């Protein structure tokens, strides 16, 4: 389901073509997307970037759309424009206070082994990099809204959760009947349960280790 189809479905379900209502449909959808994005962890919400540390500087800039870290690894270092590859060496997450105490001065040089979220724009690593180390970061970010991109992973694969979530917001805005709002909320929760089963369950196991899902036979 693309955004045009979603918008048309919302209008058809609500039978509301009032201009102010239609102008607020993007807000209904975005609010539903925010709930979805913060409830289910899906591979489609993960991103991957590479970057470099700065010699003698313990801070690393975060991507502008960064929300949380999945993993950070040192993969090599740069000397005079020549990249030397290293085996993946994953950094351990620690509190800022831990890094400050373990490496009390910025002259504690070496390959970074630890990181902490220093602010919403920067990481603190320790020890202070003695080279331009190449970092690879897997992190969580909000995907582009279907209202802007026209399509989205959720819209293509779980359109029901996006539709019911948007309809809940639309009916609350329209001051619709309480029993109908409750019905849509129930539908939204049912769709969210299925989405979480995919993101938090099926995407985190395989049949080799956990076997297939089985129902009890009586």
Image (cartoon, grey):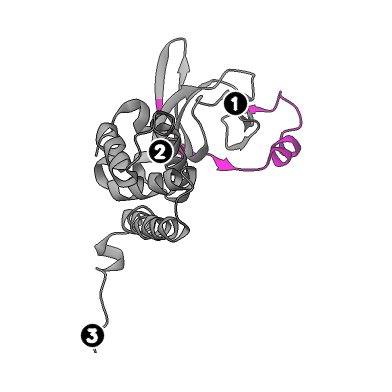
107 inside magenta stretch: yes
The region drawn magenta spans: 85-109
Residue 4, quarter of picture? top left
Helix, strand or loop under label 2: helix
Query: 148 left or right of 58?
Result: left
Q: What residue sits 28% from the left and 42% below the top? A: 12
Q: Is residue 132 above or below residue 207?
A: above
Task: Look at the numbered disc 1 and give the secondary structure of its residue.
Answer: loop
CA distance separating discs 3 and 2: 42 Å
Pointer 2: what residue? 29
According to the image, label 1 marks what residue?
121
Between discs 1 and 3, the one toward the N terminus = 1
The residue depicted at 59 percent of the width and 26 percent of the height is: 121
Q: Is residue 203 left or right of residue 119?
A: left
Q: Is residue 153 above or below residue 192?
A: above
Q: How many marks?
A: 3
Q: Quadrant of the C terminus?
A: bottom left
Counting from the top left corner in percent of width and height, residue 170 is at 42, 43
Quarter that holds the N terminus: top left
First-in-chain label (3 vs 2): 2
Q: Nearer the viewer, mark 1 or mark 2?
A: 2
Furthest residue in direction bottom, as rendered: 218
Mark 1 → mark 2, Cα distance in angstroms: 28 Å
Label 1 Cα neighbours within 10 Å, binned few <14 / some 14-19 / many ≥20: some
Residue with the mark numbered 3: 217
- The residue closer to the viewer here, 70 or 56, is 70
């Amino acid at each position: 389901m693309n955004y045009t189809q979603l918008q048309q479905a919302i209008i058809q379900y609500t039978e509301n073509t009032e201009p102010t209502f239609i102008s607020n449909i993007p807000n209904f959808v975005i609010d539903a997307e925010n709930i979805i994005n913060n409830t289910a962890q899906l591979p489609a919400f993960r991103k991957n970037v590479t970057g470099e540390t700065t010699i003698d500087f313990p801070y690393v800039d975060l991507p502008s759309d960064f929300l949380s870290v999945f993993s950070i690894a040192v993969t090599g270092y740069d000397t005079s424009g020549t990249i030397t590859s290293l085996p993946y060496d994953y950094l351990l997450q620690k509190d800022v206070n831990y890094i400050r105490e373990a490496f009390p001065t910025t002259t504690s040089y070496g390959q970074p082994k630890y990181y902490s979220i220093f602010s919403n724009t920067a990481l603190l690593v320790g020890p202070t990099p003695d080279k331009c180390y190449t970092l690879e970061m897997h992190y969580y970010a909000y995907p582009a809204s279907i209202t802007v991109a026209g399509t989205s992973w959720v819209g293509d694969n779980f359109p029901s959760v996006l539709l019911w979530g948007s309809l809940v917001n639309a009916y609350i805005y329209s001051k619709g009947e309480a029993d109908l709002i409750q019905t849509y909320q129930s539908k939204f929760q049912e769709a969210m349960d299925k989405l979480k089963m995919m993101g938090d369950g099926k995407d985190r196991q395989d049949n080799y280790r956990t076997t297939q899902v089985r129902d009890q036979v009586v």
